Image (tube, grey):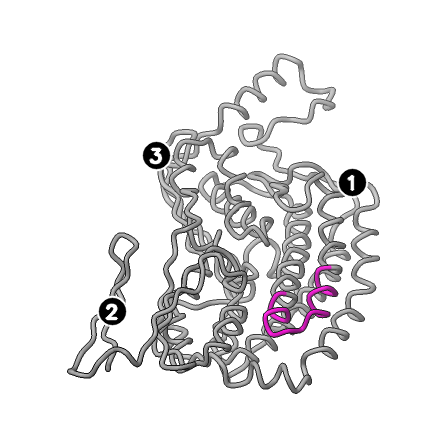
């Protein structure tokens, strides 16, 4: 029997078969949305011929938050906190993409020190995100020790974020106009101390998996994605680079202060799960390299946000500002600034791939429209191509290799 299509109609999926043969040789199985290996509330409808996947269809929408619509009824400052909940493993990158889009609308000038701090925080966030991917990918293939080591290392980065903002994950620290607050005393020294031990940890991860015969058998040749198919599906980030697509927004369309940094964009041509593993492992090494450079570029003191008082209020300890002016500025801040009418598109390189914010202003203090282009959605859409012909046991490995987050898919 040839499977022509699996379509969704009010949550009910049906199979249309072509030909006269009976469909009894095929099994249709739900994987998720509660299955732990779907990395969130993703439902997969798998059509199986024995242990072989004939077709795999993703069914998304179980985590729909309406973030894009919610932003329309919140001021530009309030809507920032919504972005933490998209790719919740990398909130600071989401904050940066949103803040850059609004700053582009405003034509705001951001201090150079702020730009370098943002780079440092986003690369630390990239390390934290990749550690979750590596640990859970190993766990899906049976490597329990890798999971424990990676989460132990991620906790150290979350400790840094807690020192910085008081919050471990949803920090909302990168804000429109700059940063929520200045760096606490000794923070850069703490980051430097953490980075001193990271190469040793990364070497241990390579020792656990890179040459491991079981890991090689589970990932090599599994879930292969050609370069052309990756482009057609809009894949970005490590998924695309593992298929030979030489594209990185940080290098090709530099934002913030990335133009001042030297780093390598890792590439592979095989496009399988092992290639995606190698690319992300190299990305962690490059993120470490960028963090080291950022520590040397960040001035020990200086402004941590723009001086434009229509965007951010003055600190209350500025004696030169009268109480009346201070109250006026805080009123402007709480009511929200009003960018001139227009629209912008701002893209950044998040740990998952290209993250883009399309924002439209009608001259009010709220976004008229916000549309987010997230990398995870494009990668989930490619699952039917990646899963076709795989064994059922390989499905979880393919899912893990894409490193998607359902909060990034359902908005």
First along the sequence among labels 1 and 3: 1
Residue that carries the numbered disc 2 in the rendered image: 15
Tell me the SS state at disc 1.
Answer: loop
Is 362 positioned to the left or the right of 238 in the image? left
**Callout in the foreground (1, 3):** 1
133, above or below 281, in the image: above
Checking the image for residue 362, the label placed there is: 3
Percent x, y of residue 197 = 82, 64
Q: Place residue 44 in its image quadrant.
A: bottom left
Q: Residue furthest top?
A: 324
Give the Cα distance between marks 1 and 3.
Answer: 37 Å
18, above or below 257, in the image: below
Q: Place residue 280 in its image quadrant.
A: bottom right
First along the sequence among labels 2 and 1: 2
Checking the image for residue 184, the label placed there is: 1
In the rendered structure, does residue 245 fall within the stretch colored magenta? Answer: no
Give the Cα distance between marks 2 and 1.
Answer: 59 Å
Specify start and end residues of the magenta stretch as a single range: 136-151
Graded by Cα atoms within 10 Å as few (under 14), some (14 to 19) or many (20 or more), the crowding at tag 1 reads few
Please report the residue visible at 34 percent of the width from the left and 34 percent of the height from the top. 362
In the rendered structure, does residue 150 fall within the stretch colored magenta? Answer: yes
Looking at the image, can residue 347 be seen? Answer: no
């Amino acid at each position: 029997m040839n499977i022509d299509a699996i379509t969704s109609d009010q949550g009910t999926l049906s199979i249309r078969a072509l030909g006269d043969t009976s469909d009894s040789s095929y099994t249709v199985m739900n994987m998720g949305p509660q299955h732990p290996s779907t990395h969130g509330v993703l439902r997969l409808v798998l059509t199986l011929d024995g242990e072989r996947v004939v077709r795999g269809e993703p069914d998304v929408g179980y985590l729909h938050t309406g973030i894009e619509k919610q932003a329309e009824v919140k001021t530009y400052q309030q809507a920032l906190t919504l972005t933490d909940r998209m790719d919740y493993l990398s909130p600071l990158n989401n904050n940066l993409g949103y803040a850059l889009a609004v700053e582009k609308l405003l034509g705001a000038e951001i201090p150079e020190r702020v730009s370098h701090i943002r780079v440092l925080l986003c690369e630390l966030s990239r390390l934290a995100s990749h550690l979750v991917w590596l640990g859970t990918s190993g766990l899906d293939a049976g490597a329990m020790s890798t999971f424990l080591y990676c989460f132990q290392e991620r906790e150290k980065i979350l400790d840094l974020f807690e020192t910085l903002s008081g919050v471990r994950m949803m920090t909302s620290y990168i804000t429109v106009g700059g940063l929520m607050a200045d760096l606490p005393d000794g923070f850069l020294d703490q980051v430097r101390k953490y980075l001193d031990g990271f190469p040793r940890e990364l070497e241990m991860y390579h020792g656990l998996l890179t040459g491991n015969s079981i890991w090689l058998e589970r990932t090599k040749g599994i879930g292969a994605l050609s370069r052309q198919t990756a482009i057609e599906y809009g894949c970005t980030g490590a998924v695309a680079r593992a298929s030979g697509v030489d594209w990185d927004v940080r290098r090709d369309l530099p934002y913030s202060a990335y133009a001042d940094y030297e780093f390598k964009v890792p590439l592979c041509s095989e496009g399988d799960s092992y290639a995606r593993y190698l690319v992300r492992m190299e990305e962690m090494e490059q993120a470490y390299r960028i963090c080291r450079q950022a520590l040397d570029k960040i001035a020990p003191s200086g402004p941590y946000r723009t001086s434009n008082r229509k965007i951010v209020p003055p600190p209350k300890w500025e004696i030169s500002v009268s109480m009346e002016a201070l109250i006026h500025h805080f009123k402007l801040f709480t009511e929200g600034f009003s960018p001139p009418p227009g629209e912008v598109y701002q893209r950044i390189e998040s740990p998952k791939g290209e993250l883009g914010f399309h924002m439209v202003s009608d001259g009010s203090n709220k976004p008229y429209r916000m549309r987010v282009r997230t990398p995870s959605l494009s990668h989930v859409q490619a699952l039917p191509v990646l899963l076709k012909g795989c064994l059922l046991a390989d499905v979880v490995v393919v899912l893990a290799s894409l490193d998607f987050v359902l909060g990034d898919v359902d908005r």
